[in-house]
Image (spheres, grey):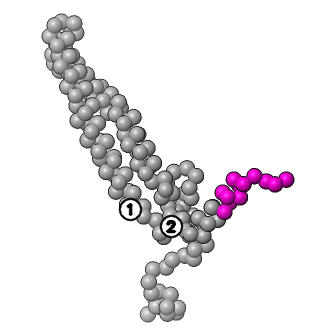
Amino acid sequence: MASMSTHGNQDKGPHLSPPSKQSLLFCPKSKLHIHRGEISKIIRECQEESFWKRALPFSLVSMLVTQGLVHQGYLAANPRFGSLPKVVLAGILAFGLGKASYIGICQSKFHSFEDQLRGAGFGPGHNRHCLLTCEECKTKRGSSEKGDSQPSAS
């Protein structure tokens, strides 16, 4: 009985701090979950495409070339393991280089996605704590832009 609250209505429902105490990152109207899905889709596409289009082909070609060089005598084979260490090392290095070579393409995908979101308040020059802008802010921004663009009559 000692744990009962003396403030009857305050225990009901989740406690939200007043708007002035909330974080600047709080935005009740934002639709971040929509953008997170798109971003995760781009990341997944980049991982799959970099594997199939760059990392795997680079790795296989480098392993075949290394095996050919060992077979022809240009590279010495290990007495105990044969060509395996050199072939594996060549495959791993080429795999990493293939993944790294695809970074530019993935960056361009993210930049094109960012350009699509510019109108929604994404990127530089927009309100960072809320992706959506209220009508009052739009009118203030519009009036300040009109005032800045008109030449002074002095």
Of the pair 126 and 96, the residue shown nearer to us: 126
Amino acid at the residue labelled 2: Cys
Tell me the magenta residue range: 143-154
Give the residue at the far top of this rendering. Answer: 73
Q: Is residue 17 magenta-colored?
A: no
Amino acid at the residue labelled 1: His
**Cα–Cα gap, marks 2 and 1:** 12 Å
Question: Percent position (x, y) of residue 84?
Answer: 17, 21
Of the pair 7 and 129, the residue shown nearer to us: 129
Q: Residue at x 35, y 54 (%)?
A: 38
Q: Residue at x 38, y 56 (%)?
A: 36
Query: In the rendered view, would you say 77 is above or below 45?
Result: above
Question: Percent position (x, y) of residue 91?
Answer: 24, 25
Q: Residue at x 60, y 70 (%)?
A: 136
Query: In the rendered view, would you say 35 is above or below 22?
Result: above
Which mark is first along the chain, 1 or 2? 2
Q: Quadrant of the N terminus?
A: bottom left
Of the pair 13 and 128, the residue shown nearer to us: 128
Q: Which residue is mark 1?
A: 33
Q: Which residue is mark 2?
A: 27
Residue 94 figure quarter:
top left
Q: Residue at x 14, y 10 (%)?
A: 71
